[in-house]
Each structure stands twice: as C-alpha cells, then as structure tokens.
Image (cartoon, coloured by chain):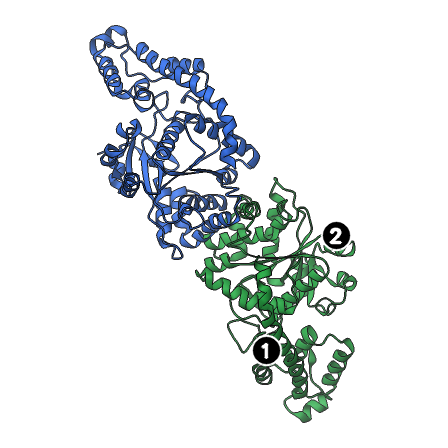
Chain colours: A blue, B green
Amino acid sequence: MQENFKVTPWEVSGSVDYDKLMKDFGIGQMSSFAEKLPKNILFSRGVVYGQRDFARIAEAIEKKKNFVMMTGLMPSGKFHLGHKIVAEQIIFYQSLGAKIYLAVADVEAYNARNPDLAGLRKVAIEEYLLNYIALGLKPKNCDFYFQSSRSRDGEKANAYYSLASLCARHTTFNEVQAIYGEISPGKLQAALLQVSDMLHPQLKEFEGSVPVVVPVGFDQDPHIRLARDISQRIKIQNFIQLSSTYHKFIVGLNGGKMSSSDSTSYIALTDSPEAAAEKIRKHAFSGGRVSVEEHRRLGGNPDVDVSFLYLKTLFEPDEKKLKIIYEDYKSGKLLTGELKQILIEKLTKFLREHQRKREQARKLVGKFLK
Amino acid sequence: MQENFKVTPWEVSGSVDYDKLMKDFGIGQMSSFAEKLPKNILFSRGVVYGQRDFARIAEAIEKKKNFVMMTGLMPSGKFHLGHKIVAEQIIFYQSLGAKIYLAVADVEAYNARNPDLAGLRKVAIEEYLLNYIALGLKPKNCDFYFQSSRSRDGEKANAYYSLASLCARHTTFNEVQAIYGEISPGKLQAALLQVSDMLHPQLKEFEGSVPVVVPVGFDQDPHIRLARDISQRIKIQNFIQLSSTYHKFIVGLNGGKMSSSDSTSYIALTDSPEAAAEKIRKHAFSGGRVSVEEHRRLGGNPDVDVSFLYLKTLFEPDEKKLKIIYEDYKSGKLLTGELKQILIEKLTKFLREHQRKREQARKLVGKFLK
C-alpha cells in the first residue's frame, strides 16, 4: 500500500487510510462497541471509527457507573460543521450519564497566538458555548472551565494546576517535541495543561477514580498517547488508563480540508440559511457527471459527494431515506442540483431552528459559568 | 583584577569579589539605604550588601505604604545559620510593615529530586516553619504557602498558576537555559512557578499594585533578572518592577562553603548546644597563629576567623563589644580558644532559647497553614 497521506497533530494531507493508521498506532475498531450503544449516526455510520480502551467506558455505560467525558475547545474561528461532530458526541455522552469536562484552552491560545484573554473568553462563549447549548448541552453534569481559571474552589484549582506542574517531571523535551514539532516554553506549558485536562478528573478533588474518555480526531492521537504515558509514570496517584475515541475528518465543502481559515470550506452554525445554501450551490464538491445527460446515463458517485456525505454524517438520521438518496444518486435518477437541494432544505431547517435556540441559550450561559 | 571566583545559580567558588560582581551585573550598593533603616546588623554590617530598585521599598517603609517581601524555601536538609540570615531579614521586614509571602518550593523539589510531596511538606514545617516562628515570624501579615497548593481561595489559586503558565509565552528556552544550565521540562516548570512566586503578589487577587522586594544571595540574581524581564513583557498587567537585595554568602565552619551536604560545615538550629560547641572547637576555621606564643606576639586575623565572623554576622549585636573582641584578637590579647569560647557561650544561650521556642512554635503552625 502506498503511503500517500499524512496525519500528525500539525498536518493532515492526502487521502487518509484510516485502517492503516489504526494498525500503525494500535488503535482498535469502534464498530463492536458502536453496535451496543444507543442509536447515534456518528457511531453507527462509522464517523467515530477508532478507540483505545473503550471497553471500560462501554461497561460504565452498561452498568450505569460513573464516568467522565473530557474534551477541550480552542477559542478561535467560527463554530462549523466539524465542531458540530464533536458537540454531538459530548451531548450524546451526557445523555448516557457521563459527567462532561469541557476545557477552554485559553492559556494554550494565549501562548500560541493570541495574548488577549478577555477576547478569547468572549469567543469561547459566543462561538462555542452558545452553540453547544443550542445543540443540547445541559448545565447539569457539565464542568465547563477555562484553563486560566479552573475553579472557584481553591482545592480544586490547586489540584488541577499542580498536576500539570508535576507532570513536567514525567516527560522530556524529546517526547513533547515529537508531538508538537518545534516546541517553545509556551507550547510545553500548553502540553502540560492539556495532560492535566485529561487526567485531573480522576483526582480526589474532582470525581475520584473513574474512567475518562476523550473523543478526538485521528490527528490528535499523539496528545492522547502523551497523557496515557505520563499517567502511568506518576507514582503519587493511580490513574485508570485513559480511554479515547477517534473520529474521521469531516470533508470540507470543496472536497478538501475543512479549514477555519477558508470560509468557503465550511458551513458555520451562525451562517444565515441563505448564505449556507449559496455556499452549497457554489462550492459543494459534487460526485455528479459533467452533464445531465451523462449523469442520467452513468449515475453519480455519492461516496465522494460532499452534499451526500453531510446528509450521511449529520443531517439525515433515517436509514431508509438515506439509502434511497444514495441509490438514486448512484443510478442517475437524482441529479446533483436535486441532491444539493435536499441538503439545503435540511440545513435551512436546522440553521433556522439552531439560531433561534442559540439566542435562547444566552440565558443559560450563567449556569455553565457558575 | 584576576577572575578567580565564580558565582552562578549552580556554582559558587573562589573568593568572591562582591564589588566586581555588582559592577558586572548592575547591582547597586545597599549602604546608603541601610543607614536609614532601623538598626539591624545584617544591614549595618554589610551582610546585605547589594540591591536593585530598593528606593521604592525604602520609600514604602518611610511613608508606611504597603509593600511585600517575597521569598521561598527549598524543603530539604537542615535549617542552619545560612538560613537564619534569610529568616532574620523576613522577620525584620515583617516588623517594618511588609506583608510576607513565603513559598515552599515543593513543586520545584518534586521536579528536581524528590517525588514525595508529603515528605516535602513535613520537612517544610519541621525544619523551616518551626524555626521561622521560633525566630519571631508572626502569622499576621504572613502568607505561607506551598507551590503545590497555593490557596483555598479558587480565584487566588487560578491567578497564581495562570500567571506561571502565561509567563511561558514571554520567555525562551535559551533564556531559561542561561540561568539553569541544562534544563528539562521539570526545571522549566519550576522556573515559571518561581517567576509567578515573585510577581503574583501584585495581581488584583492578592495585594494589587504594590512594590515587592525579594532578598536573595548574590548567586540568585539571574532568577531575579528573569522575573524582572518577563514582568515587563506581559501586556495584560502592569507590574511594578521587582526590587531585590543581595546578601553575602555565610562562610562555612571550615572557612569554605556552608553546605547542607556536609554537617561539619554548618551549625543547624536543631543541633544540641553541646554538639554545636564541639563543632566550633573542632572545625571552626581560625585566624589565629600556630602557637600561643606567636599569637601573643603577632596577633590573630579576625577578618578570616569564622568564630569572629559568626559573632559579627549573627550573635554580637553590640558594636562596642564586637570592636573590643576584634581589636583584642588582632592584638593577640585574645586567644583563639577564648574567641571560640565567646561564640560558644552566645551560641549555647541562643540554641537553648531557640529550641525551647521552637517546641512552643508547634501550636502556632496551624495559624500559618489556615
């Protein structure tokens, strides 16, 4: 097999062979667990595709034992469909009884690019928290925090930050450099806080000894491995090994990467329905043929068609309907314009509803920040 | 002038030329300020010899404005006469109205050598805090804390640790390496916490904008410079530039370095008076002559005599008495054994009294840890 793709925390390129990636890094398949989870298309349709040590999370869900789902957000750019894939997972785990730990990586952002903590805080709330709430995140069983301000409870704050500091003893520059590429004091600091983000839920000041699952994209596995490795070197606390899941990258509108820096590559959840429809008509990569006549004759390719992929991943939960769309497009019965229109209608309905909920969400923000 | 001495944070060797050191690094003389301070032999006799930006501390003292004195302790080894020189300064500043910030560098110790936080805590209290209290440190206006556990007030803890994390943006590996020699993630972390130790008293969660003085040995100036430099690069807070004072190294019993790893080089404040007397008789470097007859004829050299230097630095506050001892030893009237006996009597009295107070101090420990 040719290695024509690259997945590292600082570069994703080429057509990703997920099975090869998982084999290389010892990441397991998610499918056997996905079957037993309550219905969720991200799991049933293979978007969440890989896992490490998910068995103990599956067991906690099954036996209704305590567990934590931890993730972080980088307060920059627009909240788009790629972020929705993470948000849906957070909300899914919360519905399954998980305590949610949601870290705003504002210290990381300050150290990496933007030394304006107040501005970062605003983006975290306006772009991220409001969208999470509108998508269904509940304040109960959710610990939403800023890396710069962990807790109003001093014992908790001490424990979280000290864990980051003490982890420094248990790593080396080489190890961190292998994950982050070029490192600096700021990046090292961010790496240590991120390790503490993932490990601190198990401290006695927080949940005590509970399994923790961190859902990430495949490119983030080196960060998971660092936290897993460090956790087993610390002798003053017995950490249960971290669990993690790996989701596939959502394709950008143009068929390439979905990138916050290119607004024609994504649909933001605050895009107006009209603007979103226009983006799909204009930019959505199509698996259709060059002419209607040829399309009718040879059929389209739904497997590379971005509109179909968005329906599959996010907007058409009904298996039968999705199957009909797939087959009709493949046979040539459904034209590209018609397929796009199906997505546009679903998306318009979603965005209208979502943006209304997002405004209502403002009154809940205080409950998350208390 | 020959450079036959070396003073860096990781090495002090040779006979230190303090004036050259101060000229090289831009450290000012302390003498003009010392004259205006209430009487304290460490200042009046030139033990505290150098300063940076002490004018604003002198002004705060004179005008009875708020100021902070910050210092740290490394919880290892025995509390000896070298530590007493720092303790005397802490207590002096407290008597002049300073708020005292006293950091136990337990995270630094964990990362550098000893991953036993509970053990480090015990040493900090038994060896350091009890001796400080016995020497006169009061719980009022004293913030005694562990780096691993800054405050029970979450806002304070968040502010202290975040400052350390954010400082990472404002330094480089090269800068830290120049101070610490070989660095590791653990040492970098310790350096950042130390910078926060020195700067955080000025945060709004603590004292707000107040002058802060950090008394150190000359070898510690690179740490001061790092904190001073970083403080001026941070834009989200206006830090008043740090003040610092520099004390000379206390000579070891044998005339060389006082080292925690060589018990014949120091008197610990928990040494029994008998053991201390024995150490002085046996090990104290003498400025006397090879024979009584020669000593009587040529006189001794009090300026290199360790017993005399200890009397001057720590145990004989009376100027007239000290002068008589100096002259009698120089003239040969006072023999080495007699000089040692003067110190032994002073020291015996001090240790008896101190050790009694140290036991009484136990009941005050709780007030410092609250």
In the picture, the disc for residue B253 is 1
Position in image of residue B159 (x %, y %): 57, 45
Label 1 resides on the chain identified as B
Whether residue B174 sits left or right of residue B231 in the image: it is: left
Above-or-below relation of A356 to A218: above
Position in image of residue A250 (x %, y %): 34, 27
Above-or-below relation of B71 to A88: below
- Indicate the amino acid at tag 2: Lys
Q: Quadrant of residue A211?
A: top left
- Indicate the amino acid at tag 1: Leu
Q: CA distance from mark 1 to mark 2?
A: 40 Å
Q: Determine the residue positioned at 60% across, 68% down.
A: B361
Residue furthest to the top = A293
**Considering depth in this image, is A112 or A244 the residue closer to the camera?**
A244
Whether residue B194 sits left or right of residue B141 in the image: it is: left
Do discs 1 and 2 share a chain?
Answer: yes
Secondary structure type for disc 1: loop
* Among numbered discs 1 and 2, the one appearing first in the sequence: 2
Dot 2, crowdedness within 10 Å: few (<14), some or many (≥20)?
Answer: few
Total numbered labels placed on residues in the image: 2
Residue for badge 2:
B65
Q: Work out whether residue B263 can be spotted.
A: yes
Secondary structure type for disc 2: loop
Label 2 resides on the chain identified as B
Position in image of residue A194 (x %, y %): 43, 43
**Considering depth in this image, is A158 or B69 the residue closer to the camera?**
A158
Position in image of residue A145 (x %, y %): 48, 39
Q: Determine the residue positioned at 50% across, 54% down.
A: B148
Quadrant the N terminus of chain A occupies: top left
Whether residue A52 sits left or right of residue B147 in the image: it is: left
**Considering depth in this image, is A235 or A219 the residue closer to the camera?**
A235
